[in-house]
Amino acid sequence: MKTITVCAILALATTAWAASPPVEGTEVDCSSYSGKSPRLACTRIYKPICMSDGNTYSSECTFCMKSLQSRIGLRKMYDGQCSPVEQNQVEQNQVEQNQINCSGYSGACTMEYIPHCGSDGNVYSNRCMFCNAVNKSRGQLTLRNVGPCESS
């Protein structure tokens, strides 16, 4: 009887494991930063990582700093910069689901050009510039689409 019970449990566990959808990317271990304040002092060494939100973070430390501040649950896709195509696809999916999160953006933005069309008809050069405008408008500005604004 015990053998049958053990076999049944193993069969159920195997089935549950096999039925689980695959999770892309790997988890970043931020535990070495967890005891510190959310304001980490990261080095200026540029070692970019591409995360599951389509954003490139300049290093694991800068990702962990943002993660500790906003409790975002992201996974590392690979070492290196995310391609603009990946970033656009992730952001377009977020636009379709109304899930653009602009918390945690400050005044300093990079110079990359990945246009974002705002509900005000203005084109913002990248997500950071758009999110700074959203925060300045206290949430009144929304994202129409990723890419240049279409003339109607």
Image: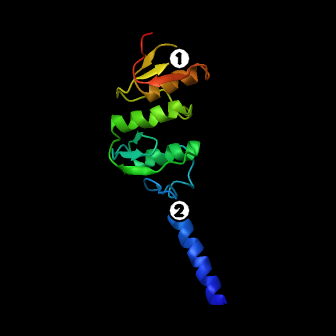
User: In the rendered view of the protein, which quadrant contains the N terminus?
Assistant: bottom right
Asked if residue 138 shows in the view, the reply is yes
The amino acid on which the numbered mark 1 sits, given as a three-letter code, is Ser
The disc placed on residue 119 is: 1
11 shown above or below 92: below
Within-10-Å neighbours for mark 2: few <14, some 14–19, many 20+:
few
Which residue: 33% across, 47% down? Answer: 47
Q: Is residue 38 left or right of residue 117?
A: right
The disc placed on residue 40 is: none
Residue 58 x, y percent position in the rendering: 38, 42
Total marks shown come to 2
Residue 24 x, y percent position in the rendering: 44, 53
Which is more toward the observer, 103 or 26?
A: 26
Which is more toward the observer, 43 or 22?
A: 22
The amino acid on which the numbered mark 2 sits, given as a three-letter code, is Ala
Residue 94 x, y percent position in the rendering: 51, 34
**Gap between marks 1 and 2, in whole Å?**
41 Å
Q: Earlier in the sequence, mark 1 or mark 2?
A: 2
The residue furthest right is: 1
The disc placed on residue 19 is: 2
Within-10-Å neighbours for mark 1: few <14, some 14–19, many 20+:
some
Q: Is mark 2 on a helix, strand or loop?
A: helix
Q: What element carries label 1?
A: loop
Q: In which quarter of the image is residue 84?
A: top left
Which residue: 61% across, 79% down? Answer: 8
Which residue: 42% across, 15% down? Answer: 150
Residue 135 x, y percent position in the rendering: 57, 24
Which is more toward the observer, 113 or 104?
A: 113
The residue furthest top is: 152
Q: In this view, does 61 lie to the left or right of 80?
A: right
User: In the rendered view of the protein, which quadrant contains the C terminus?
Assistant: top left
